[in-house]
Image (spheres, rainbow, N blue to C red):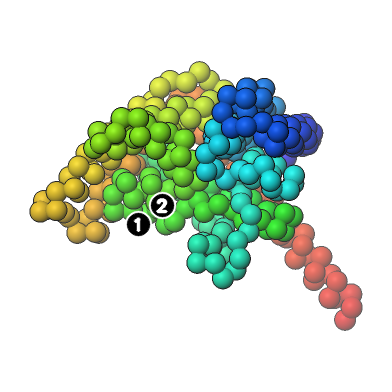
Amino acid sequence: MAGGDLRSLTAVAAGVAAAMSYVRFAARRLRPGLPRLAAFVPVLAVLPVLPLAFRALHLRAVSGFFLAWLAEFKLLLLASGGQGPLDASLPLPAFVAVASLPVRQRRPAGSENAPRSGLGLVTSAVMAALLAAIVSLYRHGEKMNNYALLMLYSLHVYLSLELILAFTAAAARVVMGMDLEPQFDRPYLSASLREFWGRRWNLSVPALLRQCVSRPVRARVGGVGGVAAGVLAAFLVSGIMHEAIIYYATLRPPTGEATAFFALQGVCAVAEGWWAAHSGWPRPPRAVATTLTLAFILATGFWLIVPPITRTETDKVVIAETEAVVVFVRDAGSWAASSVRSFFTGRS
C-alpha cells in the first residue's frame, strides 16, 4: 500500500468512526422517521465521497461497497425504524463496526442460527494459490482466447471477493470479537437465478435489498404483481449501485450497462419464478439447470458487466495491483520462513 493511501485509510477510518458516533448519538435521541432521517442526511451525503480519497483501485471499490452501499442502506433502515442490523443500544465500537463493515455481533457458538463466518485456513490457502496462478496466467493474455480470458476475470473477481471478506472476518474476530455476515454459499452450485442471486451470491446485499426495497414495493403494490414488482425493483436498485461501484473502480461516468445487466437478471428471475409456480411444467435435471444458470450469468456478464471495465483498461490496473499483492505476500512468507529457520539454526 502506498504511503498516501495509508494516510487516507487512517483519515477515512477516523471520519467514519466520527460519523457513525454521531449517528448513534442522534438515533438514541430522535424517534424513527423524518426526524432521524433529517439528522442522518449529512452522514448519508458524506459516505459516498470517502472512497474517492484512495488512489488504489481495490481500496476505492471495496470501501465504496462498504460505505456507499451497505452502510447507506443500514442507516436508512435505522432511520425508518426497520428491522436492520443496526441498533442504537449497541456499544459504540460495535455500532461503528456493524454500521461501516459487513460484520455482526458474534452469536452463541451453539446457536442454530449462527452460520459459519469466513473461510477456513485450508480453503483460504487454496483460493489464494488459485488466485496467484490466475495472475501468473495473465502474462500470456495476448495468446489466449477472449472467452478464456473472460473466464479468468470471472474467477479472479470471485476469489478476490472471497479472500477480501475472509480477511475482514479474521480481523473482525480478532480485534472486535465479531463475525462477518455470511457472504457466499458456493454460488457455482446454483440451479436457478433466484438461488444464485438470493441465496448464494454476496448474501449481505439481497438481505438489505429485501428489507429496503423488495418488501416496501411488494406491500405497496400488493398481490402477485407486488411480488414481481419487488423483485424487479431490487434488481434495478442493485444495478444502480453496481454502476456506483464500477465508477469507483474506473473513475469514469456510468454507462448504464450494469443497470441493464441487473434489470435483465430481474426480468428473467421473475419469468423463472412464474414457470416454477406451475407444478406440472417440466424442469431440467439439477446438473443441467446449474450449467444453464451459470452459462446465462457469465454470458450476460461478458456482454454488459465486463466491457465498462476492459474499455477503460481498468482490468489491467486490477491485474497490476493483484500482482503487487501476490509478490508482497510471497516475499513476506519467504522472509518469515527464513526468520524461523535462522531462529532454530541459531538455537541448535
Extreme-top residue of the structure: 253
Measuring from the top left, give residue 306's x and y in whole percent: 42, 33
Residue furthest bottom as drawn? 348
Using the rendered view, name the quadrant where residue 271 is placed.
Answer: top left
Q: Is residue 263 left or right of residue 335?
A: left
The tag earlier along the polypeptide, 1 or 2, is 1
Q: Secondary structure at mark 2?
A: helix
Task: Please rate how many residues cluster around mark 1, counting C-alpha atoms within 10 Å: few if below 14, some from 14 to 19, many from 20.
Answer: some
- Looking at the rendering, in which quadrant would you find the N terminus? top right
Which one is in front, 34 or 105? 34
Is residue 160 positioned above or below 286 on the image?
above
Badge number at residue 189: 1
Look at the image and tell me whether residue 33 can be seen: yes
Q: Residue at x 14, y 53 (%)?
A: 279
Label 2 CA crowd tier, 10 Å (few <14, some 14–19, many 20+) = many
Disc on res. 200: 2
Residue occupying the far right of the picture? 347
